[in-house]
Image (cartoon, grey):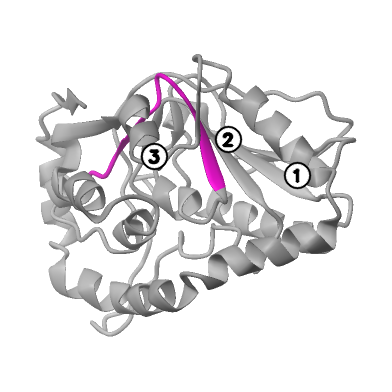
Amino acid sequence: MAAGGDVMSGSGSGGNGNAGSGGGSGVRAEVRTDGVALVTLDRPERHNALDLAAAAELTDVWRRFRFDDTVRAVVLTGAGDRAFCTGIDRSADVPQPGSPYSLDDPLRTIGPKSADLWKPVVAAVGGMACGGAFYLLGEAEFIVAAENAAFFDPHTTYGMVSAYETVHMAQRMPFGEAARLALMGTAERLSARRAYEIGLVSELTAPGEAVAAALRAAAVIAACPTEAVQGTVRALWAAKEATRERALSLAPHLISLGNLPQEEQAKLFTSRDRNHRLR
């Protein structure tokens, strides 16, 4: 299950659209006149970590976009200058079934593909992107990042299995890089520059410019015939869907077997070493 993280800096939000909507639960959605929707995770005081209400609202946004023909492409970003998203808010209470064969993960359906949205999504990342943020990055078509973005996965440090997150990242970067990201925990962060070098990030921008660059790319995509675009998205995902589905099906069992009890996780979280290496 996704875990929240620490702190970094960068990001931005913006757009010159015409119509806004939002559920008031930490997610803002604005549909612009060029056919691009800008979705912003809007909990900057919590590093855009998602509580249960925000996770549910994000799923609802994707589902609404399925029926909104004015939306032809999407840019996803985080509010503020410190984080894109740090996963599940650690203050969220997520009751679990008593059976080791069952696992309730409120982030499993926060990605656009999980909600059956096949319109292209461009992620604009500034600041931290860690833990459960990978559910979102793993279901975007490509990622634009500011130079002060940083990626890391805190799970192992806190006695948790990185399962869903690692599956998503293993499909977006070389295996060794995905393994290092997952296994180093909070001790190391992947810089935006290194993420660009290994192909996780498709474009680097100056700090605060990732959203503008992502909106420009999304506007080009939105101007193309929508049937051709969505068919191409489906073709891209078909290339790796069987492997992805098989791997994700194993995730709940690995988490149930490998996670420490929540009280032990909490001890590791409160006693964590805040030092890290940026590579």
Which residue is depicted at the point 57% across and 51% down? Answer: 141
Image coordinates of residue 200 in percent, x first then y, are 40, 42
Q: In which quarter of the image is the N terminus?
A: bottom left
- From the image, state whether disc 1 or disc 2 is nearer to you: 1
Q: Mark 1 points at which residue?
A: 221
Q: Say which amino acid is labelled 3.
A: Thr
Q: Say which amino acid is labelled 2.
A: Thr
* Neighbourhood count class around disc 3 (C-alpha, 10 Å): few under 14, some 14–19, many 20 upward: many
Judge whether 66 appears above or below 210 on screen. below
Side of 162 where 41 appears, left or right: right
Q: Is residue 21 visible?
A: no
Image coordinates of residue 47 in percent, x first then y, are 43, 31
| Label 1, label 2: how far apart the Cα atoms are | 18 Å
In this rendered view, identify the residue nearer to me: 30 or 182: 182
- Closer to the N terminus: mark 3 or mark 1? 3
* Neighbourhood count class around disc 2 (C-alpha, 10 Å): few under 14, some 14–19, many 20 upward: many
Which residue is depicted at the point 33% across and 74% down? Answer: 247
**Region rendered in magenta:** 142-154
Q: In which quarter of the image is the C terminus?
A: top left
Image coordinates of residue 228 in percent, x first then y, are 79, 61
- From the image, state whether disc 3 or disc 1 is nearer to you: 1
Q: Residue 86 carries which label?
A: 3
| Label 3, label 1: how far apart the Cα atoms are | 28 Å
Magenta span: chief secondary structure = strand
Badges 2 and 3: C-beta atoms under 8 Å apart?
no
Which residue is depicted at the point 64% across and 32% down? Answer: 214
Q: Mark 2 points at which residue?
A: 77
